[in-house]
Amino acid sequence: MPKISVYENPEKGLTPDDRGIGALSSAARRSGQLFDEAASAGESVAKDNARMVNSSIQGAGEVAVSYVDHQQISHGAAALAAFTEQKTKAWDDTLKGYTDADGTVHPPANPNDPDVARRFREKMEPELEKLQETFWTENSRKWATSQIGSIRNHFNTKTTADMGTLAADAVSVNYKTVQNTLSNTAMTSPDAVPALIEQARAGIAGIVASSPNLRGVNASHATTKLTEATVDQIVKAGAIGAIRKSANPEAVADEWAAKYPQYISGAEIKQLADAARQQMRFMRAEQRADQAEQRRADTDNFHRAANQWEMSTTRTDPQTGAVVPVTPPGLRESLTNIVNMPNAEPSRVAAMVARAERIGLQQDESSVRNLATRSRATQANLFEQTVNGQVQNKSVYRKAYVDGNLTWEAMQQLERNFDQDRSETGQPVAARRHEVIQSVEALIDPARTSLGSKSAAGSQALDQYGQWLRGKEEEARKAGKSPQSIYEYTGPNGTGPSIAVQGARQFAVSATQAMQSRIKEMTGGAAGKGNLTGPGKTTTGVEVIDVPAVGFVRGDWTFKGGDPSKQTNWEKKK
């Protein structure tokens, strides 16, 4: 520190005044401040020099660290981008399936497997940890942790969303069959549309809820999308079906548009109506063409079969060269099959029937008479079986014809009556007719009470009575009345017998006729010793019939002798 020397005045005895002393003090103080400032300035320079040196060293270190951070982050960013790309492709392969380099086939991911995404993410986790370890500076590690976390979150979101989308697509595909079935039902039964819509909604909700990979927003979106698509399809199908079935497509189209405005717009409904009209015209034209083609084919098939049949009924005589008729086996059966073919021509059918019954089957009048007799008896028997409900289909009549027990005309009449009695309008009339016939059968055929069994003469009379009733029913229809009217009571008070009952008396067989007919059936033509003439011959105007021998058995009855026309001379087995 600078030293201030003391000034001594050489003049003794002199005393400085106060102003001189003050001036000296001020000068001394100014000098001290200068020396202090000089000293402080030196110290500041030294410190600045030290700080500069330290700053230079620190700056050099930070530059080195920043360089490493930059290098690791740059390389790491590329590595993480490549990793993301690689795993994205691997996940896509997992979803759609792939084949390894060694040929191992991995099928597409099961959309209903809840562990597909989890397994993929778990397999990816060790690789993320290895990537994290490649960053060793503080800043690069922080950056890597953030980036890897983003990658992890990305794949968590992506795999979950993709599996949800896959599951939704699977639900849609799986439900497609149900969707088509509901739509087809709606088209054929438009009135079922409301019920079908409810069925679709409940079914879709159940399917989506049971899918393990459809949750939250994905589930809600899948339910809404599939439900709306299905309901839209059902409504449009129902509208198309209703429009096609209507004679006024525009009116029905407007009705459906008003009922389901959220699914059918005005433009769509007009388009549906126009399309329905075009479709109807096309279908009618196509149907007419198909029917015409089918008729041509049926006609050709009929004539081909008829030609073959006619050829089988003739042969050429080797002696004379003349064409002569023959009766091949199964002639009637084949004739029945041919005349029942579709689009058979009536005129040719009549000629074939005449050929079968007059030329090919019976060569003489006796055969014709025998067939007529058998046919009357068979027709009467089948008539009663039909009345009693024993005949359920027309094949019984055709078999009788094929067996040679019915004429073609008789078979046709039985079949016509059968069809008429089973029609919607014919059933109630037939039921009433059958009741009346059963109520008067004992009146028409006395053998049913006297002998306890029907006679052939009585059965034929019942058949004739049945045909008479049908004639009266037709007369009532032509007169504008109900056919049931002939079965109603008559008279002023409604207490008299009906027209049907009154007419029964004219068909009644006498007791003698019924007895003779029944005995002839029972004896089978067996002659007794008391016969003076043959069957059909008369003595003094009375027809003589075969008398069976005593002890003759026919069915449940045994002849005891005497007059066979009396029931007392027959004993029924107990």
Image: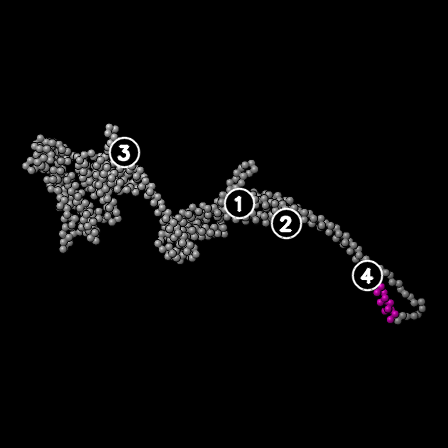
Asked if marks 3 and 2 touch (Cβ < 8 Å), the reply is no
Where, quadrant-wise, is the N terminus in this rendering? Answer: bottom right
In the picture as drawn, the residue positioned furthest to the front comes out as 320
Of tags 2 and 4, the one toward the viewer is 2
What is the three-letter code of the residue carrying label 3? Ser
Cβ atoms at labels 4 and 1 below 8 Å apart: no
Decide: few, some or many residues near mark 1? Use Cα within 10 Å; few <14, some 14-19, many ≥20. Answer: many
Q: Name the front one of labels 3 and 2.
A: 3
Q: Nearer the viewer, residue 416 or 310?
A: 310
Q: Earlier in the sequence, mark 3 or mark 2?
A: 2
Q: Badges 3 and 1: C-beta atoms under 8 Å apart?
A: no
**What residue does disc 4 label?**
37
Identify residue for label 1. Answer: 117
At 14% from the left and 54% from the top, the residue drawn is 491
The residues bearing labels 4 and 3 have C-alpha atoms spaced at a distance of 155 Å
Residue 187 visible in the snapshot: no
Q: Disc 1 to disc 2, how far (Cα)?
A: 27 Å
Q: Residue furthest top?
A: 319
Q: Which residues are magenta?
A: 18-40
Counting residues from the start of the chain, the first of labels 4 and 3 encountered is 4
**Mark 2 or mark 4, earlier in chain:** 4
Image spot of residue 499 (x, y percent): 16, 50
| CA distance for labels 4 and 1 | 78 Å
Q: Are marks 2 and 4 in contact (CB under 8 Å)?
A: no
Quarter of the C terminus within the rendering: top left
Question: From the viewer's perspective, is residue 534 above or below residue 388?
Answer: above
SS class, disc 4: helix
Query: Gap between marks 2 and 4, in whole Å?
Result: 52 Å
- Name the dominant secondary structure of the magenta segment: helix
Q: Amino acid at mark 2?
A: Trp
Q: Position of residue 557 (x, y in %)?
A: 14, 35
| Residue 304 at x, y percent in the picture | 31, 37
